[in-house]
Image (tube, coloured by chain):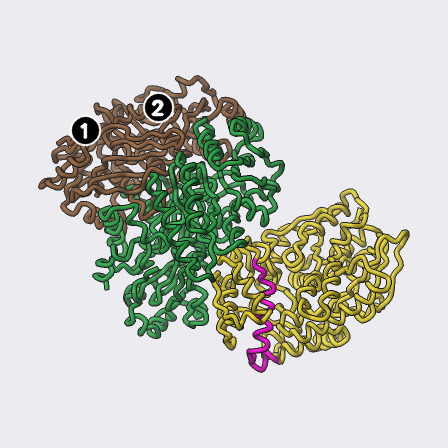
Amino acid sequence: MQTTFSEEQLQDPAIRRSNDILRSCVHCGFCTATCPTYQVLGDELDSPRGRIYLIKDMLENNRVPDEKTVKHIDRCLSCLACMTTCPSGVHYMHLVDHAREYIDTNYKRPFMDRALRWILAQILPYPMRFRWALIGAKLGRPFRFLMPDARLRAMLDMAPKHIPPVSRNDDPQCFEPLGVRKKRVALMTGCAQKALNTDINDATIRLLTRLGCEVVVADGAGCCGALTHHMGKTRESHACAATNIRAWTREINSKGLDAIVINTSGCGTTVKDYGHMFRNDALAADAERVSAIAMDVSELLMQLDLPESDDRGMSVAYHAACSLQHGQKIKTYPKDLLKRAGFTVSEPADSHLCCGSAGTYNLLQPEISAQLRQRKVRTLEAKKPDVIAAGNIGCMMQIGSGTGTPVLHTVELLDWATGGPMPRALQQSRTANGGDVPVLK
Amino acid sequence: MRPETEAELAEMVAGLAQPVRIAGGGTRGVTGPDADLSVTGLRGITLYEPGALTLVARAGTSVADINATLDAEGQRLAFEPMDHRALMGTTGEPTIGGVVAANVSGPRRVQAGACRDFLLGVRYVDGLGQVIRNGGRVMKNVTGYDLVKLLAGSWGTLGVLTEVSLKVLPRSESSATLVWSGCDWSQSLKLFSEALASPFEVTGAARLPGGSQMKQTTSETVIRIEGFSDSVAYRVGKLAEMFNHQKPDRIVTDAAENEAIWKAVRDVEPFADTAGNVWKTSVKPTDMLRVVDQPGCTHLLDWGGGLIWTLAPEGVDLRAALAEVPGHSTLVRGNDVEIARFGRFQPEPLGLAALTQGLRQRFDPKGLFNPGLMG
Amino acid sequence: MEMPLPDPDVISRKHRITTRLQQVLPSDAIIYDQAETRAYECDALTAYRCPPMLVVLPSTTQEVSEVLRICHQEGVPVVPRGAGTSLAGGALPTADCVILGVARMNDVLEVDYDNRFIRVQTGRTNLSVTGAVEDNDFFYAPDPSSQLACAIAGNIAMNSGGAHCLKYGVTTNNLLGVTMAMMDGSVVEIGGAHLDAGGLDLLGVICGSEGQLGVVTEATLRILRKPEGARPVLMGFDDNEVAGQCVSDIIKSGILPVAIEFMDRLCIQACENFAKAGYPDCEALLIVEVEGSEAEIESQLSKIVEIAKRHNPVELRESQSAEESARIWLGRKSAFGAMGQMNDYMCLDGTIPVSSLPKVLRCIGEMSEEFGLPVGNVFHAGDGNMHPLILFDANKPGDLEKCEAFGAEILKLCVDVGGCLTGEHGVGIEKRDLMTHQYGAQDLEAQMAVKDVFDPNWLLNPAKVFPLDVSATRRIAAE
């Protein structure tokens, strides 16, 4: 597409990058077909092509963002299905990130909106604060009808029934491999996940050490920055990212790392983008190195010898997290691994569509999010699975809140299949169903 | 009037003061009080490129000539146009212009498409004597409005065709027919539906009537497969397997016999030399069961049940009986009294009739071409 | 591109028209803010742009009819829009128009396997029509490259084709009936689940009328049983003309493949980058696909391969798996977008007699040198429908004009060798001014007479298809 940035505007590296992205778009419209919000709303403005147009207009004219432009960009899930579909290689992620940052800097949101975003930014990335918030939400749930805003109600609804105690496995330390050491990897233990579900990291550590990995939880590493990044709060997100880059660089420089392994794909997408985020920063080289060895846990597992197993008589509907399938282009590994471990794997119709979780999206856009959850749950349940598996805590929470079928992380199933304990969600399902529990052959 | 060239035809039309009846070979039974304007003087194939599957011919060229030319290159008109002579009791040579003007297709229409689907371009003279071109000679063409389709099946009411270009296809190497005798209507319909919903590319699904007035006493439900010999053999086998619950009575593989069966369907031969009106009804195939309900009538089915030829006693208003069934009926054969009584074509709903009248008025402002025909 | 001057009287009544439309539509179905209408200023042809006055997004035939009735009364031009994927500017707005988008009308209304049809609202995408029946092994045959995103409404308006129409035909051959709202708000039903028209073939003229005769809101489409199997073979040649000759020989042999696609070097590289389909590195690539049972495929492919071998191919490879076939087609179907990775492009759509392929390709190559703009060629070789993609730099002053002039020369050449301006994309705005090269004044007059009947005030999709000077008297008379 033609663009009309002035020479002066193009001096700004962020504008230059956005110009390159816009120039590569041919406006063919393929992206509209796989955009979840366009499916729900049917308005071009709520599709990637429409948003690209709004962003282009805003940036070219150096315009103060108007309410409507902000509305449509806020509605973007950042699921990046459009990037999978785009034949022209338009890097929508970097463009929308730039737009969000631009909006955060140049647009004054209404008070309630600002307050909510501030609260989320102050709580979610900090596991301790988040834990207390969840406990508060649980206590506050009976009073949800008093809440003046649908988004506040959504926040109360999100708090899980079971809030796990802190897992000491998430403290900085080193887990020795069982048997011969094949790799030394750093596990990113994350932020929100630690407060919502400690089983995933526990299972990951058991599984990786069992398969010959020395697993390090690096001192100082924390939130990847994605949650604030997607709200356009670049200062906060870069601060988180920089902390991580330093923590992992220390590990790389001391005992070395074969991989930084991430079991929350939303975070993985961001860590893999550190190189880009810090391209004009003093940390550029370190960031690049961190991004280069960052991998999703399924990528690492494909390099390890996961034992092959006969059919276990258990059907798994695999939900592909957007951050994994679109953000990181990892589509087959989790399914391959589950099959290898003896599970029967199915995928729902329209597997490319987002479940509506998308970081803080389910909290900020509860109506669209609920419609997407409904679609996703319907298509998953149509496969009549024993369990649903996903590789991202956000999706697990979102889908779990809409279905009675147990929802697990892929690594929990793989851990169980290779000798770990039965995943908690299955145990709970046993209690709920009076002892009728799937048997692992 | 029988012009020899397009220019001459255009000049004649420009000078017309009275309405005319446009005629090709005069085989399709359209008669009227007006003088004939014959296009049989415009004849000859002007272009034939077998490698591009394209043939262009002047409107008065006989279908027989075209068939012979195509045959020499192993090709054919895939839409298998019907020859009306036997049914209508007419003589003369059917022309390609007549085929197009009446959008005449045969049994293969159900799979390959109708005459209009193979029509790539037309030249015609409008009611002011102007020569108009639309479409062309290439297979894909969306340049401007598709008047080609509009002219196909317009029975000369919008203009006098002078030249048509057609897409042609390779002739099949062989064919075979599965035959069931004496099915009831529902059984025939079920056979059609299953066969046409199979992946075996059925190119004909028809039912020839049986009965005391007919040549054969029991009806025959017939399903045709065409293509390369090994492929035909394979698909016939698969179909026979599919119809294990209702085995065909015989499978015809002889070329001449196959041709005879499908010519009988195509030309509605069982109704030749009979008394009574002949109606042609198009409905969705499952609605066929509502059509064959009429007392005193005999029916021949084609297009998997979607096309019903009905031999009805004079005075029976088939159209009225089918008022609730979506589709349309044409009174193809009937004496002048019957035609006057029922009308040859199905009257259109008001909204569409207004459009039709508007188009005729624009294309033929003086009302010269086939007045009274088509509503 | 010249457009008629917007009617200041209509624009001055924007508020009142908006208010009237708000009475018949939900509030989120009307877009009037200039920040928002801009996103509707063009379709997939971005060289020409103009923000509309309003955009409406109705959900039912009733709402479409009400919108049209109001616009008719107010004398407001209406530009119907499907998914906005037209490469010919078929949905280009005028400044005084209402864009009528059908994207929200995407329901399946009826599926009937016994009678082999599906009835859908026309905002449904082409591929999702097949999606609705594929579990029962049926499909909807026309497959334009944009089938993932393009709407049936647009397919009908442009009479869209696709790679597989060599065997299955284009939209008009697979369309059985429509529900259409006329400009005055009345609704007509044309055709249905039965075959052929009882009177004039109005359906035939509506299909391909580029949204200028009415707004089709529902369509009855023929669905077909999927073949037992299908397999493409890739053939690489060192010379375009040899590839063209090979196509002609295959067709003459009596085999009718379902698709014969051609790509030249530039396109091969772009598509390979995107799809990783294993396309060979050569001057010309053919993708030839046949269908049937395993044995039938084998037998047809062996005949085709034998013909190809006579032309000394540098590569001859049959697809080995369903995944590989899917990748081969993904590459081909993404060709336009993939070319976008190289530069801006203008995509042409002329059709030529298959026998003229070598000559036309040679001429395009020569013109490319002359104009100094590279061209990639990708096209449906079996039916002569070419898609030369002229690469240019939209940000470089003068480049677009040069590209337009080059494009016009190519299209004139197509007409001169016996072909036409557009095989499947439609005339739209892009080829409007070339219409007089293909058709004489009387030919265009006959087409415009049809519009006079359906839309006497010339309000639907204005300024498309017919050159402005040719349609001037009608447009002025209608005002």
Q: Chain of mark 1?
A: B
Quarter-of-image position of residue B321: top left
Q: Earlier in the sequence, mark 2 or mark 1?
A: 1
Residue that badge 1 annotates: B41
Residue C19 placement (x, y as % from top left): 36, 73
Classify mark 2: helix, strand or loop.
helix
Q: Which residues are magenta?
A: A90-114
Query: Taking A189 as reference, is B364 left or right?
Result: left
Q: Are there few (<14), some (14-19), or many (20+) residues within 10 Å of tag 1?
A: some
Out of A200 and C87, give the one closest to the viewer.
Answer: C87
Chain represented in green? C
Magenta segment main secondary structure: helix
Q: Quadrant of residue C67?
A: bottom left
The numbered disc on residue B263 is: 2
Q: Which quadrant is the C terminus of chain C positioned in? A: bottom left
SS assignment at label 1: loop
From the top left corner, tell me how far across and down residue C223 is, in percent.
46, 42
* Residue C195, picture quadrant: top left
Q: Colour of chain B?
A: brown
Which chain gets the yellow colouring?
Answer: A
Residue lying at 75% horizontally and 76% vertically, measured from the top left: A129
Residue kind at label 2, given as amino acid type? Lys
Kindly indicate whether the residue at mark 1 contacts the one at mark 2 (C-beta within 8 angstroms).
no
